[in-house]
Image (cartoon, rainbow, N blue to C red):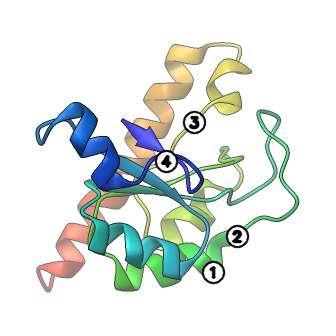
Amino acid sequence: MHVGQEELSVAQVRHVVGPKPLVGVSTHSLTQAQQAVLDGADYIGVGPVFPSQTKQFDRFVGPELLRQVAQSVNLPRFAIGGINRENLPLVIAAGFDRVALSQAVLGADDPAAEVRWFKHQLEQAAAAAGEQAAGG
């Protein structure tokens, strides 16, 4: 289950679905990301990072917020909003190895190949982060 900032709280969702299902929260600031941890979220979405064709927003959090969240939040975190091949390196450099994709896949000539490409890039980023965390 995934909720936005103006929807049910994590506690309310848990009351409805019980303790086992994963509960994620969309966040748009470092404060919201940290609050999601305190509220017991299982994962967070951070964004919108870049403009997208899926939804319209007045502002975008950009890679700097991703960097801040990566340094202070230890939950699984997904970059959301306008992620594509061109800006994925900025997302990875900010410390994220999970993304939510829509237009990048749906607009591709070969959506399955596009998913495989993103998966490969993100797996490499996760492996590199794991090596770095292990001191290697």
Q: Amino acid at mark 4?
A: Val
Tell me how far mark 4 sits from mark 2, CA to CA.
14 Å
> Is 32 on the left or on the right of 36, as rendered?
right
Q: Nearer the viewer, residue 42 or 124?
A: 42
Q: Marks 3 and 4: CB-CB under 8 Å?
A: yes
Q: Earlier along the polypeptide chain: callout 1 or callout 4?
A: 1
| Rendered location of residue 106, percent (x, y) | 67, 19
Tell me how far mark 2 sits from mark 1, CA to CA.
7 Å
Q: Earlier along the polypeptide chain: callout 1 or callout 3?
A: 1
Residue 16: mark in rendering = none
- What crowding class fits label 1: few (fewer than 14 Cα within 10 Å), some (14-19), or many (20 or more)? few
State the residue position of label 3.
Answer: 101
State the residue position of label 2.
Answer: 61
State the residue position of label 1.
Answer: 64
Q: Amino acid at mark 3?
A: Leu
- The C terminus, quarter of image: bottom left
Q: Residue at x 37, y 67 (%)?
A: 36
Q: Marks 2 and 1: CB-CB under 8 Å?
A: yes
Please tell me whether mark 2 or mark 3 is closer to you in this view: 2
> Is 74 on the left or on the right of 88, as rendered?
left
Q: Amino acid at mark 2?
A: Val
- What crowding class fits label 4: few (fewer than 14 Cα within 10 Å), some (14-19), or many (20 or more)? many
Q: Residue at x 11, y 38 (%)?
A: 20
State the residue position of label 4.
Answer: 99
